[in-house]
Amino acid sequence: MPRRRDAAATRDAILRSALVAFTHHGYDGVGVREIAGAAGVTAMLVNRYFGSKEQLFAEVVEAAFAQRTLIADDVESMSRFAAAALVAAEPRSVDGFLLMLRSVANPKATEILRNAIELRFQRPLEALLPGADRRERAALFLSVLAGVQLMRQVVGSPALAGTDPAALERRLRPLFEVLVAEEDLP
């Protein structure tokens, strides 16, 4: 008896396989054949569902960035939430940050990532921030998040990884508060 076809399950298996592959190896480090093999399908089927490696990557980025785990939905708790979430963030093997970090060498991947970051994080953050220079402040906020994640998760800075989490959170919060505040700095 032939195996029952389930398009949604097949598509999901391909996306999951691609998320793991792109996160571990970056956009340039993995091909459609490897993604297909890990999903138990052919490369032709991957292309049928997604059209191209680029489109598959775009959908993986969308899935990886679907949850905003480091940014609050209200300006009042934003600094506290970001600092606490950043300190609590455990390094994960499959993660939107690592997907980004390992794929930025490719210009197509970088464009996809930049557009997704703007849509999923930059614009919502800008909309929440009061006052002037919201775009710049939102970009700086995201840069601080990315920099701390890089130093803790990838570089493994002993000064950040070995610091008492509560103390690190107390130091991070004022950095975020400066970027959230609507007053101009001197």
Image (cartoon, helix red, strand yellow):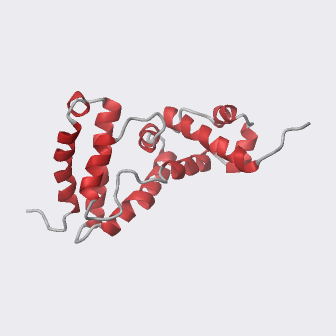
Q: Is residue 56 above or below residue 1?
A: below
Q: Residue at position x 16%, y 53% from top?
A: 174
Residue 84 placement (x, y as % from top left): 28, 47
Which residue, as the protein is rendered here, is positioned at the far left?
186
Vertical arrangement, residue 115 with respect to residue 84, above or below? below
Of 94 and 144, the residue lying toward us: 94
Q: Residue at x 29, y 53 (%)?
A: 81
Outermost residue, bottom side: 131
Coordinates of residue 123 in the picture (x, y in percent): 38, 64
Where 149 sits versus 116, above or below?
Answer: above
Q: Quadrant of residue 183?
A: bottom left
Q: Quadrant of the N terminus?
A: top right
Residue 51 visible (yes or no): no
Give left or right: position of 154 versus 165.
right
Is residue 108 shown left or right of residue 35? Answer: left
Dividing the image into 4 quarters, which one contains the C terminus? bottom left
Please, which residue is most extreme toward the front here? 166
Identified at 20% across, 35% down, the residue is 164
Residue 113 point in image, percent of width and height: 46, 50
Of 165 and 115, which appears nearest the observer? 165
- Position in image of residue 117 (x %, y %): 42, 55
- For the image shown, how many numbered marks are present on the structure? 0
Residue 4 in view in this figure: yes
Looking at this view, is 171 or 51 the one in front? 171
